[in-house]
Image (cartoon, grey):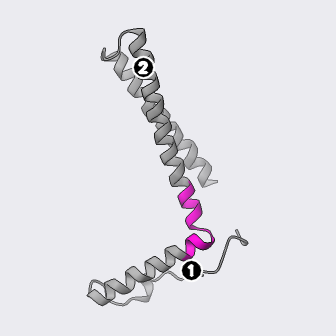
Amino acid sequence: MIQIVYAVGVLACVFHLANGLWTMGITWGVWTSPRAQAWALKLCAVIGLGLAAVSMSALYGMWAVGRGEALSRAVEVENRMYQTRIETGELQPNELKRSHVETRDQSTTN
């Protein structure tokens, strides 16, 4: 459910930005001729579609890290970073800073 709310909210923001850029150009007199407005419409559409793709990639990333092998890799990297910081003296050992996530394949349970 939260993924749907995220997607709708971010896509609405992206549309608002792209539409606002196009409208700003007309209001400020940056593109006044019909040809310039058509060019600007295409440019703002490309910007909007690019930002939409980036935002949906982030949503996919949030979904993918919580599943199976990606979760195992994330926990492994986190453990290496934690051990390195303990060895360099940046952190003191503290069990409360550890992730107690099972690293077995969870793709069948989700």
Q: Dot 2 surroundings within 10 Å: few (below 14), some, or many (20 or more)?
A: few
Looking at the rendered structure, the secondary structure element under dot 1 is loop
Percent of width and height locating residue 106 = 67, 74
88 or 19, which lies in front?
88
Residue 73 as seen in the image, left or right of residue 24: right
Amino acid found under the numbered disc labelled 2: Trp
Place of residue 75 in the rendered image (x, y in percent of width and height, measured from the top left): 50, 77
Q: Is residue 110 magenta?
A: no
Q: Is the Cβ of the residue at disc 2 closer than 8 Å to that at disc 1?
A: no
47 in relation to 91, above or below: above
Q: Can see residue 50?
A: yes
Magenta range is 60-72
Q: Position of residue 102 (x, y in %)?
A: 60, 82
Q: Nearer the viewer, residue 43 or 14?
A: 43
Q: Is residue 65 magenta?
A: yes
Q: Residues within 10 Å of mark 1 (few under 14, many from 20)?
A: few
Q: Which residue is mark 1?
A: 101
Where 62 falls versus 71 (above or below)? above
The quarter in which the C terminus is drawn is: bottom right
Determine whether 45 is above or below 13 in the image: above
Spatial separation of the CA atoms under disc 2 and disc 1 = 51 Å
Q: Is residue 13 visible?
A: no
Q: Quadrant of residue 25?
A: top left
Answer with left or right where residue 56 lies relative to residue 104: left
* Residue at 47% in and 40% down: 50
Magenta stretch, overall SS:
helix
Res. 39 mark: 2
User: What residue sits 62% from the left and 49% below the top?
Assistant: 4
Q: Residue furthest top?
A: 33
77 horizontally vs 8: left or right: left
Q: Amino acid at mark 1?
A: Val
Q: Nearer the viewer, mark 2 or mark 1?
A: 2
